[in-house]
Structure formats: structure tokens, C-alpha cells
């Protein structure tokens, strides 16, 4: 069912719809699940598959291996029956994050351990020390976090206030942005402790390019920003954007070989490396 919020404003307010498009899943038992993922068909289909499963799927060891690949983010807990508190915590966390990840449990006679698979980026996170109250939620959040995220109205402040420098990639088409993510993952993984790599819809954020030292309307484009110190480093306009060149550009910034943008000239119009 589709709803026009300009007409059904009361209904949209009831379900906390503040931006469009927005998806809400009704399970037929009086519960509603909001969709908070990217606006891509594949991601929406994954959400619907998750919604049709129980919050925690109970598996045996044989089926656990196959379950690892059912979703972009999959958490499988191998729980010793004596650790009932872990099973209870898992149900709570699964109910909280089921719209974005898939969860399963397996009985084990050994030590209770938890593994989380970020299949999109090829990463695995494991946890055996479950003493901390927030151990599971931190594991899920770390596992779900993409190496290269999508900069949106919903998460922009989280990125800007993260304390990390940001590598912005602007492109008008989703295909260009997805291709950039696929090839740039190794670089993002190398610098993930210090940098957040994000893609930006250049049409939606058309007014954001100029403050980053980029020429408005000229895309794809890339710029590095350190929000903490107010420094911006536009990448050369028209230069090749590849893992090798972007990795070298980031290293040049770290080594002080590239000067921050002065806020007036369009450094991105020339080759930034010509100054080195």
C-alpha cells in the first residue's frame, strides 16, 4: 500500500514519517517495523526477508554455515545452555536490530561465543567476553557499520561529529557510487581507524560541493574534510579517482604535503599534487 503524506498527514505523523520515501512493515499481529536502510531495491528485499523470519533463528551446527551468507550482516551466537542470560540478551538485541541484520543461535556444549559477519565488506567480528552489558550491541553496531557508508540527512550529524576525518565522494548516479565502493574498500579498510569514507548523492547534496572546495556541478568529485579542525582538502578536478591515487592523496595529506583549501580558490580545479 502506498500513502501520500501530503494528503494523509495525520496517518504519516502517527507512524513518525519525516522524510520520503519511507517504508513501514506491518506483521499482521499489531507490530510495525520501520525500514532504515539504503534506498536500493536489493536492500529493501533483504529487509522484507528479515521481517518474515523470527527475530532469532534457531539452528544446528550444520545449518549455521549456510546461514552466514543469508544477509549483508549476520550474527550467529553459539550459546552454552547454562548461559541463559546471553540467550535473553540476544533476543533483545535481535528485536532492536532485526530491520538491519539477521540473527541466529546454536546450542553448544562448549564456551559461548558470538560471530558477526559483514558480508558486504568481507569482515568478521568475534566476541567471547560477554560480561559487559552492552557487549552484544557494540558488536552488532561495529559489524553493521559499512567500510564506505552513504552520507544522508539521517546520519550526516553522526558522521560530522564522529571525530574522524571524512572522505566524500560525490556522484549523480547510484551506479557510480556503488562502483566506487566496490573498488575503494581496500583503502577504506586500511584507514578505517582514522577516516570515514562516504558516498554522496550529488543531486541531493548539490549545495554541499562548494563548501568542500569542489566545482559545483562537476562530478564525480572527491574531497577530504577534517571537521574538528575545519580543514578541507579538495581532490583535483578531473583527476583519476582510483584506490591508488586516492590512497596516495590521503597519505600526502597525512604527511603535510597538501595544503588545506583556503576557502576561496577552487583547489580542486587543478592537480593538487602539482603543488608537492
Image: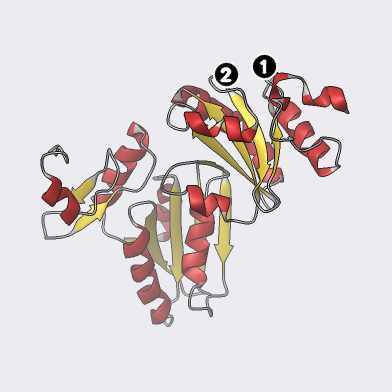
Tell which of 5 and 77 is nearer to you.
5
Q: Are marks 1 and 2 in contact (CB under 8 Å)?
A: yes
Residue 201 visible to the viewer: no
Q: Which quadrant, please, contains the N terminus?
A: top left
When the figure is inspected, residue 119 is found, relative to residue 162, above or below; the finding is: above
Q: Which quadrant, please, contains the C terminus?
A: top right
The mark that comes first in sequence, 1 or 2, is 2
Q: Which residue is mark 1?
A: 238
Tell which of 23 and 237 is nearer to you.
237
In this view, which residue lies farthest toward the bottom?
Answer: 82
Residue 34 visible to the viewer: yes
Please tell me whether mark 1 or mark 2 is closer to you in this view.
Answer: 2
Label count reads: 2
Residue drawn where x is 40% and y is 50% of the image: 67
| Residue 56 image position (x, y, % from top left) | 32, 62
Left or right: where does residue 22 sit relative to residue 120?
left
User: Looking at the rendered structure, which numbered label has been put on residue 218?
Assistant: 2
Task: Tell me the quarter of the picture where residue 272 sits.
Answer: top right
Residue drawn where x is 12% and y is 50% of the image: 11
Left or right: where does residue 103 sit relative to residue 272?
left
Left or right: where does residue 203 sit relative to residue 245?
left
Per the model, the C-alpha gap separating discs 1 and 2 is 9 Å
| Residue 163 image position (x, y, % from top left) | 64, 56
SS for tag 1? Answer: loop
Task: Tell me the quarter of the picture where residue 235 sits.
Answer: top right
User: Looking at the rendered structure, which numbered label has been put on residue 108?
Assistant: none
**Label 1: how many Cα within 10 Å (few below 14, some 14–19, many 20+):** some
| Residue 153 image position (x, y, % from top left) | 42, 44
In this view, which residue lies farthest toward the right?
Answer: 276
Amino acid at each position: 500500500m502506498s500513502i501520500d503524506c501530503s494528503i494523509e498527514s495525520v496517518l504519516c505523523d502517527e507512524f513518525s514519517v519525516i522524510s520520503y520515501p519511507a517504508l513501514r512493515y506491518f506483521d499482521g499481529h499489531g507490530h510495525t517495523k520501520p525500514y532504515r536502510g539504503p534506498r536500493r531495491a536489493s536492500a529493501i528485499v533483504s529487509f522484507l526477508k528479515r521481517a518474515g523470519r523470527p527475530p532469532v533463528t534457531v539452528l544446528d551446527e550444520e545449518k549455521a554455515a549456510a546461514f552466514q551468507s543469508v544477509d549483508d550482516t549476520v550474527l550467529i551466537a553459539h550459546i552454552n545452555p547454562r548461559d541463559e542470560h546471553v540467550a535473553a540478551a540476544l533476543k533483545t538485541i535481535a528485536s532492536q536490530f532485526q530491520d538491519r541484520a539477521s540473527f541466529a543461535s546454536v546450542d553448544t556444549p562448549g564456551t559461548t561465543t558470538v560471530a558477526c559477519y559483514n558480508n558486504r565488506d568481507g569482515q568478521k567480528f568475534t566476541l567471547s567476553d560477554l560480561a559487559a552489558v552492552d557487549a552484544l550491541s557494540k558488536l552488532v553496531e561495529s559489524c553493521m557499520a559499512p567500510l564506505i557508508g552513504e552520507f544522508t540527512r539521517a546520519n550526516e550529524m553522526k558522521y560530522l561529529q564522529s571525530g574522524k576525518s571524512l572522505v566524500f565522494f560525490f556522484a549523480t548516479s547510484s551506479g557510480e557510487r556503488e562502483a566506487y565502493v566496490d573498488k575503494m574498500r581496500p583503502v577504506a579498510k586500511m584507514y578505517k581507524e582514522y577516516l570515514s569514507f562516504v558516498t554522496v548523492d550529488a543531486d541531493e547534496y548539490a549545495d554541499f560541493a562548494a563548501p568542500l572546495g569542489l566545482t559545483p556541478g562537476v562530478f564525480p568529485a572527491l574531497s577530504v574534510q577534517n571537521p574538528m579542525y575545519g580543514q578541507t582538502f579538495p581532490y583535483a578536478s578531473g583527476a583519476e579517482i582510483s584506490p591508488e591515487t586516492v590512497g596516495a592523496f590521503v597519505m600526502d595529506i597525512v604527511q603535510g604535503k597538501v595544503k588545506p583549501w583556503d576557502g576561496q580558490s577552487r583547489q580542486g580545479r587543478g592537480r593538487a599534487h602539482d603543488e608537492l
